[in-house]
């Protein structure tokens, strides 16, 4: 017996030692080296306030618009830009990291699992910096100088900020939670009212209302490449939606991916490189082709020089350029090219997701609108109905407007005009920025820089009781949200045409073993327009349990 006990102790000791050595090894190989700065130091950084509410660092500046959007202009070498971004928007950077980590704690409430996750992410992204161009590493390093030290137990500031740039990619793995479901479309020639290229998109990336609260309209004048604008948030230097001075636009649409095994270049940084260095669709394609990504993504590229838009479809193993035979193009969350559209993964995704339905709805609205315009584009981005204007419930993933958008944006590249939505979601007014004028500004007074005469008014839906009910419903909509105090009858009353309301109510009753009530809820939910095959299967399986 003593011998068995000694063997057990020895075995456990060896296992503990191996585990400790594994942690040490993972921590060692997952350390990201800080890039060498380009000579700019924090010493002597002076933030001036020439007017109340206007902040400047050399020629870079920062202010908050009455629209609720923050406006940032930066120029210079990479590290200098990073320092300027950090010093001018320090509070927003620290706030964004705090809410992001709070959301992670809601998703993974166990400290033990979070610690394991930390080492896994460190291992997974161990070579991340090798896939990020030196220019962007320098810029991110500059930004990281103002990062909070409250999260140093996760990783050093630079390593954290660099890893956050893969947040959109990580969202791919959460598609089944309806966190990523973007819609984009473009018209030109005979499909546009004045024949110019018009592009509209909703960026439906949702990780909580707090995460989307502070949006920054950033204008960049880099030392190399083209000047450009993008809509972003504190600490993010990658591109989600943007347009450069050449009239080239980039927007991202997630596609279905296999589970990645190692990191590569975050898609937001591929988009950033395209926006900064491309002026045509071919140049954008060439940049995307040379970068390896670890998720599948569709980059919708609009080009004033080409007078049209196209979609670069990219997976970890292949790339294709999809060009529409008509004078319009639509992108949701599936591939369309012959090369990537016919893969088994893409076909399976199309048969089980809301993407094809949303695609058809955009087609339907463009057909009914006649020749497209900027205002018509805003109306499509705000549309909450299903095919044939059917009522499919508020927040349905099959709707173009799912009431979760981080932002809606409209481009008119040939005129260098861009409209950006204000809160809430894409329902607030769309304010217009003229790139021809913004890049010539050198403000010393805190004055509005958007073109008020081109503002698109807020959606009248904001005045409706249905909107107020949708806000109440959204509190319980996602799995990572706190559902304490959930009342099934209230959910159904707030969103009576939504399968999700009945599904959540059914789950509540099933959890409380009220089987007859759960059965009634699931049956009503299955009679509604269900967004995904996974959710339909969930209700069908739970319905069997009720019987």
Image (cartoon, rainbow, N blue to C red):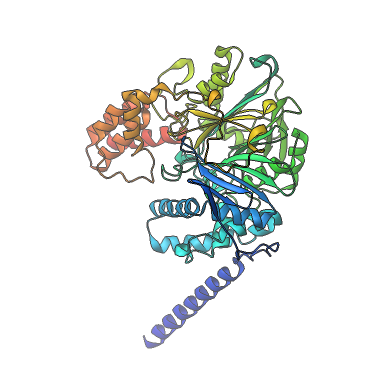
Residue 135 appears left or right of 114 = right
Q: Is residue 382 above or below residue 49?
A: above
Tell me: residue 216, above or below residue 402.
below
Q: Residue 428, percent across and down?
A: 45, 29
Choose between 83 and 242: the one closer to the eye: 83
Q: Can you give x and y, in whole percent of width and height, for residue 9 in the image?
A: 42, 82
Residue 52, image x, y percentages: 48, 46
Rendering quarter of residue 247: top right
Residue at horizontal 56 percent and vertical 28 percent from the top: 451
- Quadrant into which the N terminus falls: bottom left
Q: Residue at x 53, y 30 (%)?
A: 431
Q: Residue at x 62, y 55 (%)?
A: 82
Q: Quadrant of residue 194?
A: top right
Residue 231 as seen in the image, left or right of residue 244: left
Looking at the image, which residue sits at the far bottom?
2
Is any part of residue 133 visible from this angle? no
The quarter of the picture where the C terminus appears is top left
Residue sitting nearer the eye, 32 or 137: 137
Foreground pick, 53 / 507: 53
- Is residue 310 among what the camera can see? yes
Question: Is residue 99 found left or right of 366 in the rendered image?
Answer: left
**Residue 297, image x and y in percent?**
62, 40
Please state which of residues 33 and 354 is positioned toward the viewer in this rendering: 33
Q: Please count the marks in the image.
A: 0
Name above or below for residue 313 compared with residue 131.
above
């Amino acid at each position: 017996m003593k011998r068995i006990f000694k063997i057990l102790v020895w075995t456990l000791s060896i296992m503990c030692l191996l585990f400790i050595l594994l942690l040490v090894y993972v921590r060692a190989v997952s350390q990201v080296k800080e890039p060498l700065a380009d000579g700019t130091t924090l010493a002597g950084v002076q933030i001036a306030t020439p007017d109340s509410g206007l902040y400047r660092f050399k020629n870079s500046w920062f202010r908050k618009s009455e629209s609720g959007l923050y406006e940032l202009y930066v120029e210079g070498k990479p590290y200098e830009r990073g320092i300027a971004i950090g010093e001018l928007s320090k509070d927003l950077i620290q706030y964004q990291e705090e809410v992001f980590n709070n959301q992670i704690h809601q998703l993974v409430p166990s400290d033990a699992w979070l610690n394991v996750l930390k080492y896994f992410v460190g291992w997974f992204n161990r070579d991340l910096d090798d896939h990020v161009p030196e220019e962007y590493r320098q810029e991110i390093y500059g930004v990281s100088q103002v990062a909070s030290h409250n999260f140093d137990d996760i990783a050093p500031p630079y390593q954290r900020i660099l890893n956050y740039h893969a947040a959109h990619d990580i969202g791919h793995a959460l598609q089944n939670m309806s966190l990523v479901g973007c819609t984009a479309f473009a018209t030109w020639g005979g499909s546009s009212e004045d024949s110019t290229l018009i592009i509209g998109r909703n960026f439906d990336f949702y990780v909580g209302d707090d995460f989307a609260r502070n949006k920054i309209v950033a204008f960049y004048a880099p030392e190399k490449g083209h000047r450009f604008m993008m809509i972003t948030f504190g600490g993010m230097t990658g591109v989600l939606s943007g347009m450069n001075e050449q009239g080239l636009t980039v927007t991202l649409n997630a596609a279905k991916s296999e589970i990645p095994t190692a990191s590569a270049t975050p898609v937001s940084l591929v988009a950033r490189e395209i926006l900064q260095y491309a002026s045509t669709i071919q140049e954008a394609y060439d940049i995307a082709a040379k970068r390896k990504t670890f998720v599948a993504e569709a980059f919708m590229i609009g080009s004033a020089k080409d007078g049209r838009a196209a979609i670069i479809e990219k997976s970890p193993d292949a790339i294709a350029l999809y060009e529409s035979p008509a004078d319009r193009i639509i992108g949701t969350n599936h591939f369309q090219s012959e090369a990537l559209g016919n893969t088994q993964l893409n076909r399976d995704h199309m048969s089980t997701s809301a993407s094809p339905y949303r695609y058809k709805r955009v087609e339907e609205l463009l057909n009914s609108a006649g020749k497209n315009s900027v205002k018509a584009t805003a109306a499509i981005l705000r549309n909450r109905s299903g095919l044939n204007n059917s009522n499919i419930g508020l927040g349905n993933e099959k709707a173009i407007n799912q009431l979760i958008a981080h932002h809606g944006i409209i481009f008119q590249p040939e005129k260098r005009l861009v409209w950006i939505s204000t809160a809430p979601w894409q329902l607030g007014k769309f304010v217009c920025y003229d790139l021809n004028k913004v890049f010539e500004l050198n403000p010393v007074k805190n004055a509005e820089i958007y073109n008020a005469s081109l503002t698109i008014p807020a959606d009248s839906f904001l005045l409706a009781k249905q909107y107020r009910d949708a806000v109440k419903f959204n509190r319980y909509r996602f799995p990572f949200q706190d559902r304490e105090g959930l009342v099934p009858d209230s959910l159904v009353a707030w969103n009576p045409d939504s399968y999700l309301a009945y599904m959540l109510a059914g789950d509540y009753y099933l959890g409380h073993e009220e089987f007859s009530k759960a059965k009634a809820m699931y049956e009503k939910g299955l009679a509604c327009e269900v967004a995904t095959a996974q959710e339909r299967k969930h209700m069908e399986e739970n319905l069997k349990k009720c019987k």
